[in-house]
Amino acid sequence: MGVTRQYCGRLGKVANCQAGVFLSYASDRGHTLMDGRLYLPREWAEDRPRCGEAGVPEGVTYQSKADLALASLRQARRAGHLTGRWVTADEDYGKVPTFRDALDAEGWWYVLEAPGTTPVFDRHAKSEVPAGSGKGRRPSRPRLLEGEPGPQAVAALAQGLGTDDWRVLTVAEGAQGPRRHRFAAQRVWESREGLPGRACWLVMRRNLDGSEPKYYLCNAPSDTPLAELARVGAMRWCIETDLQTAKGEAGLDEYEVRSWQGWHHHIVLAMLAVAFLLVLRLDWGEKDAPDHLAPDQPGVALSASAAGLDPRRPGRLAVQHARAD
């Protein structure tokens, strides 16, 4: 169910597979998975007989991955499971303007990865609706004034920066030592149909040797320190670690179910097992295992404080999740 040719993160290429959208919560206490939803490709969602055979509820329609991510965030916020306001995600989500707009409208501050080809304005170019020639239909859409600069790709903007524009920052303590990268940021304006849109931060990151450049769009206030923007953007490794942990310790990806309900039940039970192991590890670590790594270290399985994430503990969280499915 939901299987089609699409990008598979485990294989790193396009293949026949299922895709899920997962929500991870991270704080100074650690991080853990909170939600998981099956992505149903449009060819599946529009084939109602096929959906019926797989037990897909009648009211389930096509939702993009960005739509599913928003639904997860909204549900977690309504349930009181999220106390922070930062959101970070990879470029599959950051490249979607409507996703950024929804987060902004609902009060989230985001640091979302964006493709290097993403167009932005490095200054607020002026535009107006042309007066028209008096013949034919009068223009109704604004255009850039003559002489105003157009948008440029974020990768091109980054290439134009000088050495002094970059700062080396430590964003986390990794298993192999401090995770350090070069960062730069500047205020830009989103390009919406070739015209300046909302003002935002463009955050740029690269390795110390200049390799693996990454770009992020961020709607945080203009006085937000670069170190904070860098820290939030770099927190995306948490969900990758959480997924690896859930697969390795709770069999998140080890199933042979063929139904909508079966997939969601498996995911809920796997996350419940993850939460149980987390609580057990923290309890034992406090009493009998002082040499265990601190729970905020990468590579440590299930490292968030369950009490800090939800005072009702994992059992109640899993019950609510199951009802939502």
Image: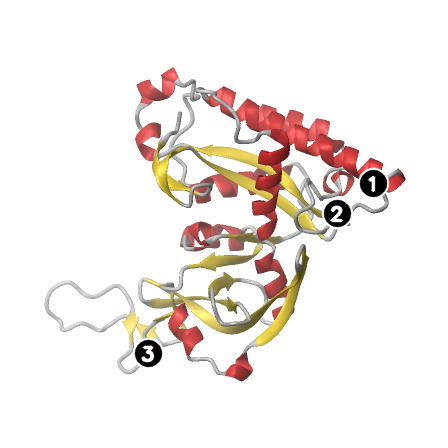
Q: Position of residue 210 (x, y in %)?
A: 49, 72
Residue visible at 69% across and 47% down in the picture: 83
Disc 1 and disc 2: Cα gap in Å?
A: 10 Å
Total tally of numbered discs in the picture? 3
From the image, tell me which residue sits under label 1: 285
Query: What label does residue 93 carry, if any?
Result: none
Marked residue nearer the N-terminal end (3 or 1): 3
Residue visible at 42% across and 80% down in the picture: 160
Disc 3 and disc 1: Cα gap in Å?
A: 59 Å
Question: Is 50 or 243 nearer to us in this picture?
Answer: 243
In the image, farthest residue toward the left: 135
Residue visible at 37% across and 30% down in the picture: 3
Q: Amino acid at mark 2?
A: Pro
Query: What label does residue 295 carry, if any?
Result: 2
Q: Amino acid at mark 3?
A: Pro
Disc 3 crowd, CA 10 A, few/some/many (<14, 14-19, 20+): some
Q: Position of residue 15 (x, y in %)?
A: 35, 38
Q: Amino acid at mark 1?
A: Gly
Q: Is residue 260 left or right of residue 87?
A: left
Label 3 vs label 1, nearer the camera: 1
Q: Is residue 115 above or below residue 129?
A: above
Marked residue nearer the N-terminal end (3 or 2): 3
Disc 2 crowd, CA 10 A, few/some/many (<14, 14-19, 20+): many
Disc 1 crowd, CA 10 A, few/some/many (<14, 14-19, 20+): some
Residue 298 shows up from this direction? yes
Disc 3 and disc 2: Cα gap in Å?
A: 49 Å
SS state under label 3: loop
From the image, tell me which residue sits under label 3: 149
